[in-house]
Each structure stands twice: as structure tokens, then as C-alpha cells.
Image (cartoon, grey):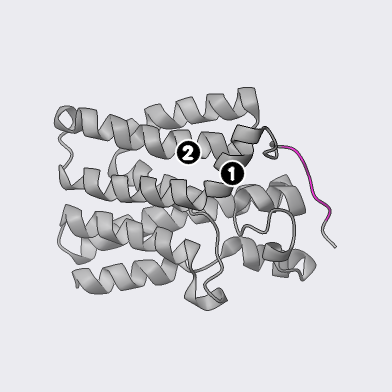
Amino acid sequence: MGILSIVLSYLIGAVSFSYLTGQLLKKLDIRDHGSGNAGATNTLRVLGIGPAIAVLLLDCGKGILAVWLGYLMSGGDPVISAGAGVAAVIGHNWPVFFGFRGGKGVATTIGVLATLVFWPALIAGTIAILSIVFTRYVSLGSLLFVIGTTVLTAALYNVFNYPFEYIYFLAGLTILSVWRHNENVKRLMKGTESKLGQKVKAT
């Protein structure tokens, strides 16, 4: 049942809400517009704030659902719960239903981390939001959130009684996120990264 929950979590993660929203509203493939990323930030650029908020919440929900699915189907095994969460992020990034062309998994990762390690995620999330407010770089905030949550969990897992195994899964998510944001990191270093609010017209 634990293995089944991980497979199901991948399939849940593979539902690309940004793609479906683009098809529903404008009959377009979101991956052919803006940054080409199938996620909430590009949905904001191409389709506007309403669709972007919907995609953000739905993508977060995939991560939350996956963790709980793993927890319930495994009888409360924290390793399976974390594995299911990671599977959902992988599904979002490489969705079997959409030619394995997905997003960067940030919103789904938010849902996973907020469910597994709420307090470290809350602290890191606050820092990430402040960084986005002041710099308008969503990619920077995303990386600060994932890295910060992992570092805080590693430092405080005894305080909050989190299973030590979570640290391995969080480290994996951090490596995956940094890798997926490789081009963003290069643009941040060059000062050419797109800022929040820069809208691209859909054609």
C-alpha cells in the first residue's frame, strides 16, 4: 500500500493545472508562452492574477494530498509520507500526462513541506515572502524557502520531534529545486531575472 501511495502521488502531481487553465481560458499551451514554465508564476505573467492564484492553490494542494495519502495508506509511516510528497513534486516536474514537460515544482513543494514540517516551513516561508516583496524575484524567494526549510529542519528536528529521515527527503527536494532553477540562478547573478509583475501577452 505504501508503494501504491507513492505511485498515486506521482500521478496526482502529474496533473498540470497551469496547462489545463491555459487550455480552458485561452486554448493555449502555457509552456509555449512567457517563461515556458508550467507553474503559477508563468500563469501570472500570461493569464493574470486570478488564474495564477487558482493554480498556486491547486498545485499546493497536490503536495498536501500526496503527503496525507502516503500517511493514511501506509498506516502512518513518515518515510512513506515524505516519499509520497517527493513523488508528487516529481510528477509535477515531469508529468506523464503532458509529455513529461512540467514546471519547477515550487508550489507543490510548498504543500509538501508545510504538511511535513510546518514550523520550519512557516519561518522560511516568511523570509521568502519578504524577499519577494522587496526584490520582486519569485525565483529567489522560492530557493530561500526550500533551502531555509531544509536547514531549519536539520537544526530543529529534535525540538519539533520530526523524524530524522525527513532531512534526507528535504535535502533531495532542495537539490532538485536548485537544479530546476539553474537558469534562474544564472540570471539572478547577471541581474537579468524577470521580476514579479512583468506580464507577457499571450498570443
Measured in 3D between alpha carbons, the distance from the residue under mark 2 to the one under mark 1, in whole angstroms, is 10 Å
Of the pair 193 and 6, the residue shown nearer to us: 193
Q: Quadrant of the N terminus?
A: bottom left
User: Residue under circle 1?
Assistant: 184
x 30%, y 32%: residue: 151
Residue 140 location, x and y as percent?
54, 35
* Callout 1 crowding tier (Cα within 10 Å): few <14, some 14–19, many ≥20: some
Q: Secondary structure at mark 2?
A: helix
Q: Work out whether residue 117 or residue 142 is closer to the camera in this orientation and state it.
A: 142
x and y percentages locating residue 15 in the rendered image: 51, 68
Mark 2: few/some/many CA within 10 Å (<14, 14-19, 20+): some
Please state the extent of the stretch shown in magenta in the rendering: 197-201
The quadrant of the rendering that contains the C terminus is: bottom right
Do callouts 2 and 1 mark residues in contact (Cβ within 8 Å)? yes
Q: Quadrant of residue 79?
A: bottom left
Taken as a whole, is the magenta stretch helix, strand or loop? loop
Which residue position holds label 2?
Answer: 143
Q: Which x, y percent locates residue 97?
A: 52, 77
User: Can you see residue 21?
Assistant: yes
Q: Quadrant of residue 149?
A: top left
Q: Residue at left 48%, top 54%?
A: 105
| Amino acid carrying mark 1 in the image | Asn
